[in-house]
Amino acid sequence: MSRSWIVVWADFMKHQSASKDYWEVFESEEQAKNCYELVLQDHDVAAITAVIASSDYEPHAKFN
């Protein structure tokens, strides 16, 4: 398997326009979905992404 799934989320600072961003990389869509569901319990902003191109991670098979 390849590390081609990424879950991203953000913490927004109260009374500020800034946020702190986080991400975690996964080998499977199932792992990413599990993380996504957990993240949504405590955060309002989250996304699952598949890697199209990267210097650090393997592209999802659909984009090879």
Image (spheres, grey):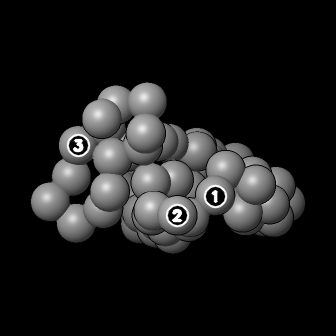
Q: Position of residue 17 (x, y in %)?
A: 38, 49
Residue at disc 2, secondary structure: loop
Q: Residue at x 72, y 63 (%)?
A: 31
Distance from Cα at disc 2 to Cα at disc 1: 7 Å
Residue located at (45% from left, 64% from top): 3
| Residue 3 located left or right of residue 57 | right
Give the image quarter of residue 58. Answer: bottom left
Q: Of the residues shown, which amino acid type is indicated by label 1?
A: Ser
The residue lying toward the viewer, choosing from 16 and 9, is 9
Q: Position of residue 46 (x, y in %)?
A: 61, 48
x then y, percent, for residue 57 = 30, 62
Tell me how far mark 3 sits from mark 1, CA to CA.
17 Å
Q: Earlier in the sequence, mark 2 or mark 1?
A: 2
The amino acid beneath tag 2 is Met
Q: Which residue is mark 1?
A: 28
Disc 3 to disc 2, C-alpha distance? 16 Å
- Asked whether the viewer can see residue 15, the reply is no
In the drawing, what numbered circle is on residue 39?
none
Instruction: Give the labeled residue for mark 2.
Output: 1
Check disc 3 and report the residue beneath it.
53
Q: Is the C-beta separation of discs 3 and 1 under 8 Å?
A: no
Q: Residue at x 23, y 43 (%)?
A: 53
Query: Taking the image as drawn, is residue 41 in sight?
Result: yes
- Given the current orientation, which residue lies at the most extreme top position? 62
Q: Earlier in the sequence, mark 3 or mark 1?
A: 1
Neighbourhood count class around disc 2 (C-alpha, 10 Å): few under 14, some 14–19, many 20 upward: few
